[in-house]
Amino acid sequence: MAAGTSSSAWVVMRPGPIDSSPLQLVERDIPSPGPHDLLLEVLACGVCRTDLHLAEGDLPPRRPQCTPGHQVVGLVIAAGQASEGFSPGDRVGAAWLAGTCGACRYCRSGRENLCPRSRYTGWDIDGGYASHVLADDRYVYRLPADWADDQAAPLLCAGIIGYRALQRAELPPGGRLGIYGFGASAHLTAQLALARGATVHVVTRGREAQRLALELGAASAGPADPPEPLDSAILFAPVGDLVPVALGQLDRGGTLAVAGVHLTAIPGLDYARHLFQERTLRSVTANTREDGGAFLAEAARSRPRVRLTRYPMSRADRALADLAAGRVTGVAVLVRDEEV
């Protein structure tokens, strides 16, 4: 399909509660690729809670009428003049991290996720809730041919950020990991930890999520505290009230990593109970391309099961509404209408 013809895309017209229909479907020209851009025909796009935060205004928009979506599996249609190594027909993945300056002290020290001029798919640039999207060829990932489009899409954020969170949580070999909240990223991270030999305890209120956690191999899953002290914990639920709860379950020297891009207010902490004995609280900010490559290589070996619900691209608004209402277990994925 040539650039300049019509393309459909969902845009955040006016951020607000999901029942106020902040997401609107529009028609616009297919964009022309810049020097390093790949023009992708979108095959599948994962639905992330970050997209919901953007639509509802918890995550302040960085540009008007932005198209969400940062777990994009796409087919290369055209490439910019400076692009190297990709040809029309190649299948690639575009993830949350869309660009960095490459020159600041963070980029030079291998911490490009902290680059002050970093850009993000579906926030700074249009994302994958569309028929076509542009992606910088230096920030995309090649995908194994035997990964189905809908199975691969969630790995590009839910998987990658879960990997980063697990690294930040510093889970020791054979350690005890607590996971708070059990959605898209958590159900992949649990499998990653289990494949590494960890004992996993899941704290979630959802009955279906509890069943999924136990089915995947968690030692316990329920709404109450884990049955034993934890070496590490990851908070996926965007609920600040859970920070002292999770810290209180850490053993001496344990680490809690907060994985979300948005979190409600954290209540006061008691130093002796929550932080003393060298307990650590740390955030997780995006990911590096090295994280992405390392996770995808590990996933190719361990083959995590992706529990997904497919939605046609024309019902992206319904997918976000279901996510907001807790009706999605695992991960929601948008696919082309003719494939549902």
Image (cartoon, rainbow, N blue to C red):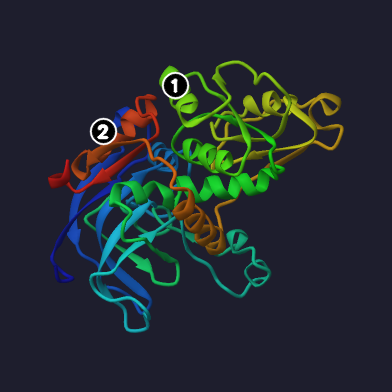
Instruction: Residue 275 in the image: state x and y as whole percent.
Output: 81, 32
Distance CA(mark 1)–CA(mark 2):
24 Å
Task: Give the left or right position of residue 34, taking residue 160 as reference.
Answer: left
Q: Nearer the viewer, residue 274 or 67?
A: 274
Residues tagged 1 and 2 counted as in contact (Cβ below 8 A): no
Q: Is residue 66 above or below residue 328?
A: below
Residue, disc 2: 318
Which residue is drawn at the image coordinates 49% and 24% (left, top)?
214
| Residue 62, numbered circle | none
Q: Quarter holding the N terminus?
A: bottom left
Q: Is residue 130 above or below residue 176?
A: below
Q: Quadrant of residue 206?
A: top left
Q: Quadrant of residue 230?
A: top right
Q: What amino acid is labelled 1 in the image?
A: Arg
Q: What amino acid is labelled 2 in the image?
A: Arg
Which residue is drawn at the image coordinates 35% and 45% (left, top)?
46
Q: Quadrant of residue 211?
A: top left
Residue, disc 1: 211
Instruction: Residue 220 in the image: state x and y as whole percent.
Output: 57, 22
Q: Nearer the viewer, residue 34 or 322?
A: 322
Q: Nearer the viewer, residue 225 or 298?
A: 298
The crowding category of the residue bearing disc 1, from other C-alpha atoms within 10 Å (few below 14, some 14 to 19, many at least 20), is some
Which residue is drawn at the image coordinates 68% and 39% (left, top)?
174
**Helix, strand, or loop for circle 2?**
helix
Residue furthest to the bottom in view is 81
**Helix, strand, or loop for circle 1?**
helix
Task: Give the left or right position of residue 16, taking residue 249 as reference.
Answer: left
Instruction: Residue 254 in the image: state x and y as whole percent.
Output: 76, 36
Indicate which disc, 1 or 2, sits on the residue closer to the N terminus.
1
